[in-house]
Amino acid sequence: MLGRAAPGLLRRAQQLKRSAWLAPAPQRLNSGLPVNIGVLFVPQQEAWVVERMGKFHRILEPGLNFLIPLLDRIRYVQSLKEIVINVPEQSAVTLDNVTLQIDGVLYLRVMDPYKASYGVEDPEYAVTQLAQTTMRSELGKLSLDRVFRERESLNANIVDAINQASDCWGIRCLRYEIKDIHVPPRVKESMQMQVEAERRKRATVLESEGTRESAINVAEGQKQAQILASEAEKAEQINKAAGEANAMLVRAKAKAEAIQLLAAALAQQHGSAAASLSVAEQYVNAFSKLAKDSNTVLLPANTGDITHMVAQALGIYTTLTKTQAVKTQDEIPPAHGDPQPPSTEVLKAEQATSS
């Protein structure tokens, strides 16, 4: 009977061995740790810490691993993935004695499974407590306004402090993010009033700057307008002066030509009679315009004697022409042997002409 039962027991042992080799995943006890059945498959991004007879033996790598049943025991299972831990809400006091309620999110990863297993009892709880205490200490160094402005630097300081303390635990903190910051209602109201006052201040400053810019622009426009007006007036005066000068030159040339023509006409035969006729016509025209512009009129004693007036005008003209002739003769140097006329004769001629 023993001989017959031996093949059955052998086949049973082979089936158990085959099932152990083909097991997709190890069975776990109620504690969550896998059971050592000799052949184990470790998943990727996990590290299984094995103890042999109560002492650390080795860390199983992902893939196929062999252990001795009863002697070897899987004591810890560490995940090498990035772990996200919610940091509970806690109260913290800022530098200006304002109580805040702050919560956050912690991202960490197990770098050394051995230290994470034997360096601390509960790594996640230890890191959470460390994050809370570090956050309270960092918030105590900042005022309320700087807490809102320097959230990134605050997160970086918390991460550095956690990494310095958790190095012996085999855990590395990758980043820490503050989720919500709750301030007391009164402080919130005062902050809202401060924001509104700041906005009103900025609006007033912008309005004053706009008014200033507008006044500057208006003044610049007036300045440019005055400059342009003065330049235009200057150009107008220059043009007017140039026009008047040209007109005076034209009138002087015309008068000179008229005088030359008149002199030529007087030098001809019967020129004196024509001059007497012109003087008589001007005399009559002048008397026709008397008492038109004003009631006060000054008249000579012999107003009706036109002949006497014409003779007097011609005498003045003759005296002027003779005086001019004498001056021209004085300016011309006399020729040798020609005696100069005495000045007494010229005076006598002038007196006779004037009488």
Image (cartoon, helix red, strand yellow):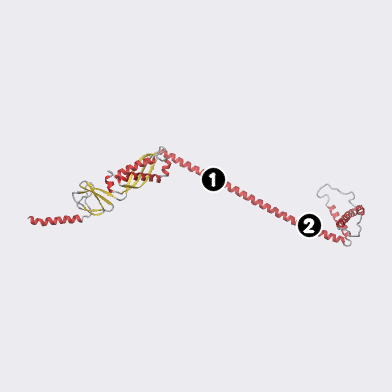
Tell me which corner region of the image, top left, top right, bottom left or bottom right, holds residue 154: top left
Residue, disc 2:
252
Nearer the observer, 6 or 204 = 6
Nearer the observer, 292 or 146 = 146
At x 30%, y 43%, the residue is 126
Q: Is residue 230 visible from the viewing direction of this image?
A: yes
User: What element does badge 1 sit on?
Assistant: helix
Q: In this view, does 262 lie to the left or right of 163?
A: right
Q: Position of residue 247 (x, y in %)?
A: 75, 56
Q: Where is residue 144 in the image (x, y as percent from the top left)?
A: 42, 40
How many numbered discs, if any? Answer: 2
Residue, disc 1:
209
The numbered dot on residue 4 is none
Check whether the beta carbons of the residues at disc 2 and disc 1 lie within 8 A of each other: no
Q: Is residue 167 left or right of residue 281?
A: left
Tell me which corner region of the image, top left, top right, bottom left or bottom right, holds residue 13: bottom left
Q: Position of residue 124 (x, y in %)?
A: 30, 45
Q: How far apart are marks 2 and 1 (CA)?
A: 63 Å
Nearer the observer, 224 or 53 = 53
Depicted 146 relative to depicted 321: above or below: above
At x 52%, y 44%, the residue is 205
Q: Where is residue 278 in the image (x, y as percent from the top left)?
A: 86, 57
User: What element does badge 2 sit on?
Assistant: helix
Amino acid bearing label 1:
Glu
Q: Which residue lies furthest to the front in this view?
A: 336
Q: Earlier in the sequence, mark 2 or mark 1?
A: 1
At x 38%, y 46%, the residue is 156
- The quarter of the image holding the N terminus is bottom left
At x 20%, y 56%, the residue is 21
Q: Is residue 307 left or right of residue 233?
A: right
Q: For mark 1, does the 10 Å Cα neighbourhood hold few (<14), some (14 to 19), or many (20 or more) residues?
A: few
